[in-house]
Amino acid sequence: MESIDWQKKLGAERFGSDFEYTHFFVRDAGRNGLLGYTETLTPELVFSAYLQGIFPWYDEDSGDPVLWWSPDPRFVLFVNEIRFPRSAVKFLKHSPYTYTIDAAFSRVIENCAHVHRAGQDGTWIGNRMIDIYCALHERGIAHSVEAWHGNELAGGLYGVLIGKVFCGESMFTLESNAGKSAFMLFAKAFERCGGVLIDSQVYTENIARYGGRNISRAAFLRMESELLPQKLSDDLHTVFGEIAAETVRTSRLHAESASNR
């Protein structure tokens, strides 16, 4: 009962005192993590799910019901274990991009929905999901990070931030290294603000390169019960802005140095 109390409290903080908390029975999930389905999908229902380590994932275009998942194992990235590849660190020193946070959420999620992915036909991000996550963004729950080349959006990512856990949902890249470099800056800012865990849900080669690993569902849920009610130690937007500005300054210094040789 105590765990449900903090979950209801967080819901009330974001949605108001009339927030309707929905309890999922995670213990009923099999190894693949499928809990069941609903016909409805609301911001309150999705937030209730995230508070319990659950997320929606289904093929909206095929007319499927909303499927709810809590996989075992869970693929996560501990921010204090992140290993940035040398090539990526080198790229940031010469990055042609500028970076923002929460400057173009709807454009980021729409790009994630429509960008072509090798080996995939379509995407799980339909119009219904876009509306839900945009509603969560308006309540300060879902966030985006953008990489800009001039005035054009070159890449980005979005996810759900609760306490000291960031649940990464999707990333897109229109120009070389745009999405990856945006993720690196976000990870640096998140760690500096006291963030602990980035949830990647299931294995991806991209996150594995940074040190992502599988943990059991039971371990993940224990960590979430500790980390979700906690607050970050600093303002993420301020810290990200400082890191992004320093990245731009460093890139310009390198460019000026190269042109003077």
Image (spheres, helix red, strand yellow):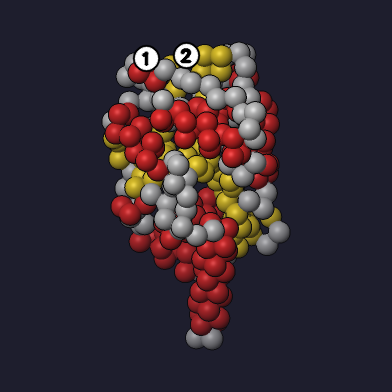
Q: Nearer the viewer, residue 201 or 254?
A: 201
Viewer-nearest of discs 2 and 1: 1
Circle 2 Cα neighbour tier, 10 Å, few/some/many (<14 / 14–19 / ≥20): some
The residue wearing badge 2 is 36
Looking at the picture, how far across and down is residue 84, in whole percent?
36, 57
Amino acid of disc 2: Gly
Q: Dot 1 lies on which element?
A: helix
Residue shown at 30% from the left, 40% from the top: 213
Distance between mark 2 and mark 1 Cα atoms? 9 Å
Q: Is disc 1 surrounded by few (<14), some (14 to 19) or many (20+) residues within 10 Å?
A: few
Residue occupying image coordinates x 39% and y 37%: 224
Which numbered circle lies on residue 28? 1
- Check the picture and name the quadrant holding the N terminus: top left
Q: For mark 2, give the secondary structure.
A: strand
Tell whether label 1 touches label 2 (CB within 8 Å).
yes
Residue 143 in the image: above or below residue 62: below
